[in-house]
Image: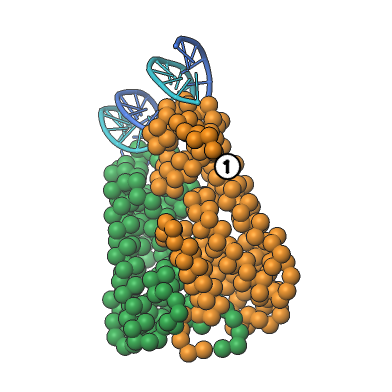
Chain colours: A orange, B green, C blue, D cyan
DNA sequence: GTCTATATTACGATAGAC
DNA sequence: GTCTATCGTAATATAGAC
C-alpha cells in the first residue's frame, strides 16, 4: 500500500461529503457554500470535480438504486415460492439500506423539482412495482392473509423498511445489530407484534 | 349561511395553499414567489397575513402536533392493558394522519435548519418517547413477543404508520377506504402478513 | 388587502491566476 | 487541483401608493 494521503478530492470522495450534508440539511437546503465548507475546499474547486450540485445528487441516488435493483436479480429472489422470494427481498432490502445508508436516505427524500429528481422517483416507482408483483404472486399462492388489501400491505411493508433511514445508525464494529434489526423487520412484517400465535 | 365568497385570504386559508406547495416542492424548495403564484396574490400581500415563510411552517406543524398529542390524552389511551392502549394509539394516529394529511406530511419531512424546524423535531421526539413508554409497558405485561427488541419494534411500527403520508390519498366521499387502511395497519402490525396463525 | 417597485442578501456557476 | 474575484439570477423582505 502506497500510503496515499488523501489531501485532495476525487468525485468519489467528494460525493460522500456531499451526501452527508444533503442528508443533514436537505438537498434544497444545501448551498454550494455549505458543501465547500464541509469539504474544506472552495466553491470553485468543487466545480473542478463535478459539473454542479445536481451531478452529486445523481451520482448518489444512482448508487442507491443500483443496490436496490441488484437485489431483485439475486437468485433467491427469482425462484421458489413467492412468499419466500418476498421475504428474501425484504431482508436484502434492509441490508442494502444499512450498507448504503446515506445514499438510500437521500434517494428516499427526493421530491421531484429537477430532472434528476424526477428520474429517481420514476426508478423508485419501478422498484416498488416489481415488489408489488411479487406480493401479488405470494397472495395468489395463498401464503398471505386474505383479509388485507395486498397493495396496501405492500406499501406498508416497504414503508416500514424505508422508515429505517430515519433512525438506524450502524454501531461501529458491531455486525450483530445488523442481524438483529433485519430479523426484527422480518418477524414484525410476517408474524406481527403480538404474542400467542 | 351568508354565502361568504372568499376572494380574499386569511392566515388560515393561506395556510392550506402554502402547505400544499410545501409538500409538493419541499419547504426549502418553495420560494415566496411559488406561494404567491399558487395563492393568486402577490408576494407582498402574503406578508400582510403572515410575518414570513417560517410562520406558515410553524402554524402547519403545530396543527399536526396538536392532533397527534391529543390522541395520547383520549380516555382509551390511558386505561386498560397496555397492549390495548398501544393498539388504540396506533389506530387513532393513523386516523389523525388521514384527517390532517398535509399537515402531518409536512411535519414528518422537517429537517432542522431553522429554529421552528428544530422545535418541531423536539416535539416529535417527545411524542415518540411517550409511545415507546406504552410499548415498554405492553412488553412488561407479556403481551408483545419477546424475541424482538421493543425499541426497534416501536420505531418500525410508527415508521410504518408514518410512511402512509407517501402514498395515502383520500377517496372523495369514501369513508370505507379509511376504515380499510386503518384495519390493515393494525392487523399487519399486531398479527403479521403471513397466513396460518 | 392588494399592488408595483425595490432594497439587500444569498445562490449557482464561471473566469483566470497560480 | 486549488484559489480569489465576480457575474447574473433569484431569494426574502420592505416601502409606500391605491
| Above or below: residue A5 compared with residue A132 | above
Residue, far right: A79
Residue drawn at point x = 32 percent, y = 43 percent: B52
Q: In the visual, does B15 lie left or right of B171?
A: left
Q: Which residue is identified by label 1?
A: A59
Dot 1: element: helix
Q: Quadrant of residue B45?
A: top left
* Viewport quadrant of the N terminus of chain A: top right
Residue situated in front as seen by the camera: B7 or B138: B138
Residue drawn at point x = 38 percent, y = 58 percent: B107
Crowdedness of circle 1 by 10 Å Cα count: few (<14), some, many (20+)?
Answer: some
**Where does residue A78 sit, x and y in percent of width and height?**
72, 66
Residue drawn at point x = 44 percent, y = 45 percent: A20
- Residue A67 in sight in this render: yes
Q: Chain of mark 1?
A: A
Q: In the visual, does B110 lie left or right of A60?
A: left
- Residue B192 in sight in this render: no
**Where does residue D15 sit, x and y in percent of width and height?**
25, 29
Amino acid at each position: 500500500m502506497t500510503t496515499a494521503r488523501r489531501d485532495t478530492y476525487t468525485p468519489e470522495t467528494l460525493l460522500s461529503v456531499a451526501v452527508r450534508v444533503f442528508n443533514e440539511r436537505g438537498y434544497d437546503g444545501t448551498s454550494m457554500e455549505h458543501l465547500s465548507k464541509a469539504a474544506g475546499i472552495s466553491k470553485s474547486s468543487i466545480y473542478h470535480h463535478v459539473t454542479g450540485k445536481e451531478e452529486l445528487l445523481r451520482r448518489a441516488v444512482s448508487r442507491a438504486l443500483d443496490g436496490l435493483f441488484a437485489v431483485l436479480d439475486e437468485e433467491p429472489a427469482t425462484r421458489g415460492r413467492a412468499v419466500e422470494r418476498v421475504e428474501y427481498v425484504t431482508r436484502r432490502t434492509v441490508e442494502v439500506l444499512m450498507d448504503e445508508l446515506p445514499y438510500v436516505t437521500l434517494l428516499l427524500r427526493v421530491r421531484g423539482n429537477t430532472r434528476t429528481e424526477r428520474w429517481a422517483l420514476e426508478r423508485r416507482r419501478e422498484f416498488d412495482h416489481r415488489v408489488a408483483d411479487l406480493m401479488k404472486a405470494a397472495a395468489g399462492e395463498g401464503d398471505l392473509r386474505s383479509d388485507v388489501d395486498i397493495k396496501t400491505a405492500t406499501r406498508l411493508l416497504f414503508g416500514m423498511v424505508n422508515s429505517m433511514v430515519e433512525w438506524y445508525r450502524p454501531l461501529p464494529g458491531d455486525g450483530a445489530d445488523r442481524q438483529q434489526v433485519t430479523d426484527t423487520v422480518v418477524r414484525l412484517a410476517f408474524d406481527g407484534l403480538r404474542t400467542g400465535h
